[in-house]
Image (cartoon, coloured by chain):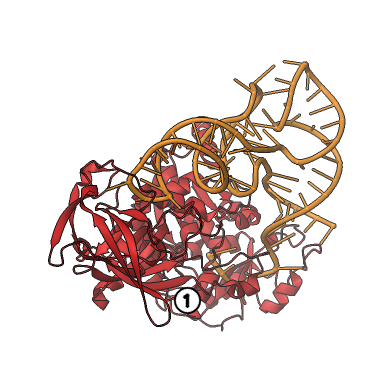
Chain colours: A red, B orange
Amino acid sequence: MEHKASSNFIKNIINEDLKSGKVDHIITRFPPEPNGYLHIGHAKSIILNFELADEFKGKTHLRFDDTNPVKEDTEYVESIKEDVTWLGYKWDELFFASDYFEEMYNRAVLLIKKGKAYVCDSTAEEIRKMRGSLIEVGQKSPYRDRSVEENLELFERMRQGEFEDGQKVLRAKIDMDSPNINMRDPVLYRIAHATHHNTGDKWCIYPMYDFAHPLEDAIEGITHSICTLEFEDHRPLYDWVIRECEMEQVPHQYEFARLNITNTVMSKRKLKQLVDEHVVDGWDDPRMPTISGLRRKGYTPEAIRSFAREIGVAKADSVVDSKMLEFFIREDLKLKAPRTMGVLEPLKVVITNYPADQVEMLEAEINSENPEMGTRQIPFSREIYIEQDDFMENPPAKYFRLFPGNEVRLKNAYFIKCNDIVKDEAGKVIELHCTYDPETKSGTGFTGRKVKGTIHWVEASQAVSAEFRQYEPLILDQEEDDDTSFLEHINPNSLEIVQGFVEANIKDSKPQDKFQFFRHGYFNVDPLSLKQGKLIFNRIVSLKSSFQLNK
RNA sequence: UCCGGGAUUGUGUAGUGGUAGCACGUGUGACUCUGAAUCACAUAGCCUAGGUUCGAAUCCUAGUCCCGGAGCCA
């Protein structure tokens, strides 16, 4: 079912590393910062890291890169673990960057002793100014040549909490003339009197990403440290830290292009904004590209994994068509989901020549493409509901559904022919009177005549009320990716809620159960279903359709 | 302007000197008790210009265009 992904440049590198003897095993890692929920872009990275390890018989660590207490929270730690697990992966080891704070501190002391780091009293503003620009070199800090002894003492006092936030930082002493701004004496440690979700108030100095991350990788023996493109410029610093801190293990960093999908925002910052400003109901709103949102919408881990394999891994920026994602969930659910009938916008039909007191049971396949799923019994009687869209009083040419005088098949039941229309005062069609032909019963092999259309229906007396939530892309097409105004491209019709009916035999469905409603698409039972005491179905994805009313 | 990357059908990706392939999408037809699915066919590509070579997407040279980089964020 799930086929192996084709090659990619990282896989090629690993193959070469193994062949050349540069490494004899591989260890990868997924290193999220616990400051938000995971989205499908993270899924790409998770799948890449775990499957690379699988393929080469290596290991993968889950490591929380929790070096900034002001943004992080255990809520996020828990959701991240849940999402990785749900995607189908088991980390070989679970770590927190904060577990290494003591070791990192000691490595910083080593740097100071080697004359490779110094305590700088400049303000953030001063440091920024003296860093120079993309085309101008930087200026050396006046504190750059402090003695090792003084630096050691000051750094120790930073740790002891003798200074306020922002009063001092520890900086690497590298090269203020470097064309790579990351090498112009980057900050290694800052002071933050903040409570850390893991270490509490033990520390008031915290290592910066550029210092912490390479050490984390080296400590854990990561062989291939895979990150996104924006860290490419940091690689020389990554290597510098590992070398100057004299780490025994030498990991290497490789960068790939992050995932973009059409009509989808994919940054934690923007997603958080959607949540904070109540544009959506939360991180798990089915319109969100978060793992939890996709899960609630009804996506399966298998579909997400297949998608990730198919889109590949490369260094060129790209935007994947969201139709690709939709293809994989349809593909996955095709044989798994029971197929049943649901009428989303009901129109009552009275079958005038059917006995008023009779209810008969009809047999129907649960999934015609997967006969192993068996059959079910569905009731049929004088009154049923059909879809409003399946009737037109004055249809255009090539309309195969019901209209006055036309005959269609009711899926799994009989041919019916429309004879009369009942309207309300406003002229709206509220009921149809039809007749059925007993000879056309499904399964009898009737071939007397053919109809062009087959429509779905639900028997009225036993129909179960249900709510259907139909989703459209949250974000409309946007010319340029103008960071500031993505909120202006919110689709006002991203959610449409309708009340209809489903077959009685699925009335006891549980949250996350998935069905195909004939001719509509795949739906997932929302977790809210239980709480609200009624069935709520989220549309995962519609069925493809070539039918256009106005052609 | 400085540094680092990138460019293969509409989209995503493979190909690393020897017939440019795969997936999605799109179109047409067949079939159909889902206007679905399925099947068949079609669709369309190596950024440009030179060079090396029997042979170049691949190697060389020079351009063009796009992306990222100046947090005490990651």
Name the spot of residue A148 as percent of width and height, x first.
62, 67
- Between A20 and A53, the one lying in front of the other is A53
Q: Which quadrant does the C terminus of chain A fall into? A: bottom right
Name the spot of residue A301 as percent of width and height, x first.
37, 53
- Between A296 and A221, the one lying in front of the other is A296
Residue A44 visible in this rendered orientation of the protein: yes
Horizontal side of A267 relative to A146 (left or right) equals left
Name the spot of residue A224 as percent of width and height, x first.
50, 46
- Between A321 and A270, the one lying in front of the other is A321
Name the spot of residue B1 as percent of width and height, x first.
85, 57
Can you tell which quarter of the image residue B16 is in?
Answer: top right
- Identify residue for label 1: A275
A218 is higher (above) or lower (below) than A165: above
**What is the count of numbered marks?**
1
A435 is higher (above) or lower (below) than A309: below
Task: Report the amino acid beneath label 1.
Answer: Val
Residue A28 visible in this rendered orientation of the protein: no
Horizontal side of A165 relative to A326 (left or right) equals right
